[in-house]
Image: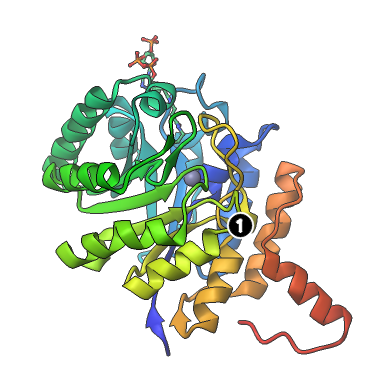
Amino acid sequence: MGEPVIINEVGLRDGLQNQPNPVRTEDKSRLAQALVDAGLRHIEPVSFVHPGAVPRMADAAEFTEQLPRGEDLHYTALVPNLKGYEKARDAGYQTVALVLSTTETFNQRNLNMALDDAIASCQTILHQANEDGLNTRTYISGAFACPYEGPVTVGTTLHLTHEMIEAGSAEIAIADTIGGGTPKQMKDIMAPLLHSYDPERFFVHLHDTRGLAAAMAWEAADLGVRRFDASVGGLGGCPFAPGATGNMATEDLVYMLEACGFDTGVSIHKLREAVEIANEITGGQWGGRILDWIRSQEEQGKAVPVS
Ligand code: COA
Ligand code: ZN
């Protein structure tokens, strides 16, 4: 068996938050069950945000009650502010995902806060979460590029990362929210962080807007990152980041990592069923690149060497 890698499935939150049509809570539950059946054990199903800002997450508390349960299932809720944190804690989440964007404008658009206020807000939430005994993960959003202000320096991302670790964030997710980064940037950001901190503290969150997500994921894996976000079918986009397309598809990430000898614990064949459900409930046509290849192999009657 290969070295284990954790894949954190974010399609239910990062993917569904951006869908043009409402998705019923029971349909979200079907998708959640399919993801668990495919072997995913880390899932971010909801955010506790203002329902006016993100209407698709308005059922967060109700959906949480319908999630599959099991000792090995780890759920995370995204929280934009202290009020969201309290709702997540009260709903029973053990891990919360905070958001800190790298620029003034992105923080304003996403959280209605100046950068300094967003930093202070994260510090308050981290303090409270540590007091409450919850696990914390802070997303450095726009870690490679900002949808409003353009390129983001490596120094900015490293500075905010150090600041959040100092404020008590157990984990950090380096997030290419708009898919504007490069493998070279990934190396420049992750190499010093992995030199200073335990690799288990880091997640990488990628969108595939310019087709570089797989190259960036591999760069991170090669450097020692063992935790990745991904989204079933590549479902995704951000309502506050114009131009961002879907996340790196879970099935593509699983294929790449398994083909390189890692153990994800996830079945691509079972993920196909989850992709079908995702398409059915969103009316979309999502699906990672690997699924096209699997279909063409099957059409030619050839073996498909994936789990
Ligand atoms: N969940 C639900 N309601 C919330 C809330 C939350 N997390 N935070 C604040 N509110 C409510 C307040 O209670 C208040 O309600 P009232 O008018 O009935 O009294 C109202 O929203 C305004 O509160 P305020 O603190 O001024 O919030 P805001 O208007 O500045 O909005 C956010 C800030 C963060 C809540 C809002 O911008 C948001 O939800 N953004 C979504 C970010 C997101 O999901 N991004 C994508 C993922 S990174
Ligand atoms: Zn994202």
Name of the residue lying farthest toward the right: 300
Q: Percent position (x, y) of residue 107?
A: 36, 27
Give x and y (percent) for residue 272: 69, 66
> In the displayed structure, would residue 28 be above or below residue 111?
below
Relative image position of residue 161 (x, y in whole percent): 23, 47
Vertical position of residue 202 compared to residue 111: above or below: below
- Kindly tell me whether residue 173 is visible in this rendering: yes
User: Ligand 2: does it lie within 8 Å of the C-beta at label 1?
Assistant: no
Q: Is residue 32 left or right of residue 163?
A: right
Seen at 56% across and 36% down, the residue is 17
Of 239 and 48, nearer the camera is: 239
Which residue is the site of mark 1? 211
**Type of amino acid at the residue the image marks with label 1:** Gly
* Relative depth, front residue between 44 and 25: 44
| Label 1: element kind | loop
**Is 143 displayed left or right of 254 in the figure?**
left
Q: Residue at x 59, y 59 (%)?
A: 249
Image quadrant assignment for residue 276? bottom right
Q: Is residue 115 above or below residue 233?
A: above
Q: For residue 8, say whether it is visible.
A: no
Above or below for 284 versus 199: above
> Residue at point 52% right, 33% down?
241
| Screen quadrant of the N terminus | bottom left
Direction from residue 244 to residue 177 in the image, left or right:
left
Ligand 1 in which quarter: top left
Residue at x 18%, y 39% (from the top left corner):
126
> Camera-side residue: 196 or 284?
196
Based on the displayed image, in which of its 4 quarters is residue 100 positioned? top left
Locate residue 263 relative to residue 123 in the image: left or right: right
Q: Where in the figure is residue 40, as x and y percent of width and height?
A: 49, 65
